[in-house]
Image (cartoon, rainbow, N blue to C red):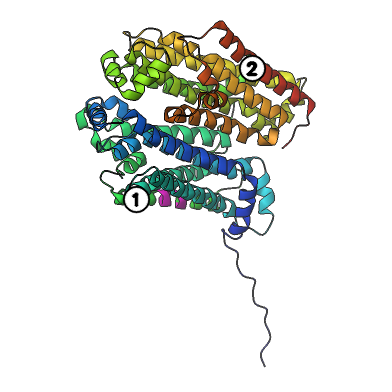
Amino acid sequence: MTAATIAPPAREGAGTGTFRVVPFLLRRDRILLPIWGLLTVAVLLGAVAGAESTYPTAQSRMERFQQLQELPIFLLFQSAAFDDSLAALATQQAFGATTLFSAIGALLLVVRHTRTEEQHGRRELLGSTAIGRNAQLVASVLTVMATGLVIGLVGAAGLLGLGFSMPGSLLFGLVATGATWIGVALGALLAQVTENARAAAVAGFVLVMLLHYVRGLGHLADGRLEWITMLSPAGWLEGVQPYAGDRWWMLLPVAGVVALLLLTSLAISSRRDLGEGLIATRHGRASGAPYLRDVFGLSLRQNAASFLTWAVAIALIGVAFGSVGTEAAAEYGDTTWMLEYAAAMRIEDPGQAFFVYTVFVFVFPITAYATLNVLRLRSDETSGNAELLLSAPLTRSRWATATILTTLLGSAALVVIFGLALTVSSPGVGGLFTLTFSLIPAVWVFVGIVVLAIGLVPRAAVALAWIALGAGIAGEILVKTGLPDIVYLATSPIGHVNPYYTTAYSWMVLLAIAALTTVLGILGLRRRDLSR
């Protein structure tokens, strides 16, 4: 006679419940994911479509190809050119913006779904249900990677619609997907390494930009540093050479690194304590400096490290572009689109137009800094830090004003640093400092928009902040492809600033809009409940 036994329950793995979390993530980011995807595709197709009007003839394309060979400084920010065909030059022009937009967006989304959830306690709440330890991480990775694949396929379809060949279009779409997956892998790893979502996001942003510039460094020094390009995944994506070499096998090392980073992330996630990171937060001093007793001093201290990092990066970029020199800038300015741009901006010297365009492009990273900085208000609110501060004799208005004022001063200082770096490194070009200084009110308008969103629609504030910035970037790119002026001016405050015919009225309007949106945002924050 045998005794009946009860089978032991099935052992749940670390990934149990992953596909129950995916719909939750899709529901939560039902607006943010499509907006990011559409903006990324718009950046890709806009930059590609602009090449046809920029280089309309075979002669202009040949001149552009030779220009890139003779002036490799441009390759620090753009891709190398591997052929003088329209399609190859179009992807050369679109590579930088497309890969950066894809990677940074994916990285921020993964950090938002993992470390941010863990930091705010929602991951622990979700973990009390029947899901595995790694379910949240795996679901986040799968969701964003799938979105990246859709971006690549839609981008490839758009390129086919523009008349480009199938193999090159598919490969460039896969380049965008590869950049997205690199951002996913970096975001997943940094979410395990750090204890703070903001630190993970900033570190990821800096790392993506660093990998991009390492790729560009390999094209300097007359090709003697080409090996450096292969040290960066961005260099591998560049080596795919859509519409030129069509080297699909260069995607294999990208896939290998993505897999390695994801496996490392899963291994760390399985072993670390919930809420902790691989690198522990450094303990603070036993007593703080006297200036930390004031909320403004505290805000300055919180943002000091990130400001210094951005200042160094902005200064290096300014010096790099300023060192191009007036002759090289004049040569670059002697292209069809740059001549049209100079005419539209009422600039007589095409070489001067190159520097004007440079300033208008690189004001957006400074705007990204301002956006990240002022969003600290929302992150402090959801993490409970704001409630802790407001338990002291401190009003909401003073608390918010401290962060806003720090952001305004910091962004203005970065604009000044960029202008000084350009001016010092290009002494033969006049008016650059005045040009950069005139952009400060436009950057402040973006700050006001974010503050207004935090005050009135706090749950959508993060999404609206990045949508506003993405719309500005997309408008700056699409204006080269015939975007109506009224649409361009409606999507970006930057478009309203032109020192060659600007008046005190436009300065006053931008400052008034920035002040009005900021005040309304603070009033909204005072009247509503703090929320998580």
Q: Which mark is residue 421?
A: none
Q: Residue at x 34, y 28 (%)?
A: 54
Q: Nearer the viewer, residue 282 or 460?
A: 460
Q: Is residue 384 left or right of residue 232?
A: right
The N terminus, quarter of image:
bottom right
Write down the quadrant of residue 109 in the picture: top right
Q: Which mark is residue 166?
A: 1
Say whether residue 319 is visible.
no
Q: Residue at x 43, y 31 (%)?
A: 481
For disc 2, the neighbor class at 10 Å (few under 14, some 14 to 19, many from 20) is: some
For disc 1, the neighbor class at 10 Å (few under 14, some 14 to 19, many from 20) is: few
Closer to the observer: label 2 or label 1? 1
Residue 42 placed where, x, y %? Answer: 47, 37
Residue 261 lies in the magenta stretch: yes
Q: Nearer the viewer, residue 511 or 60?
A: 60
Residue 200 placed where, x, y %? Answer: 52, 37
Residue 436 placed where, x, y %? Answer: 46, 13
Q: Secondary structure at mark 2?
A: helix
Q: Is residue 140 left or right of residue 356?
A: right
Q: Secondary structure at mark 1?
A: helix
Instruction: Tell me which amino acid carries mark 1.
Output: Met
Instruction: Tell me the distance, in whole angstroms, between the alpha carbons under discs 2 and 1.
Output: 47 Å
Q: Which residues are magenta?
A: 258-263
Q: Nearer the viewer, residue 351 or 229?
A: 351
Residue 188 lies in the magenta stretch: no
Instruction: Tell me which amino acid carries mark 2.
Output: Ile
Q: Residue at x 21, y 32 (%)?
A: 223
Q: Which mark is residue 513?
A: 2
Position above or below: 359 against 474: above
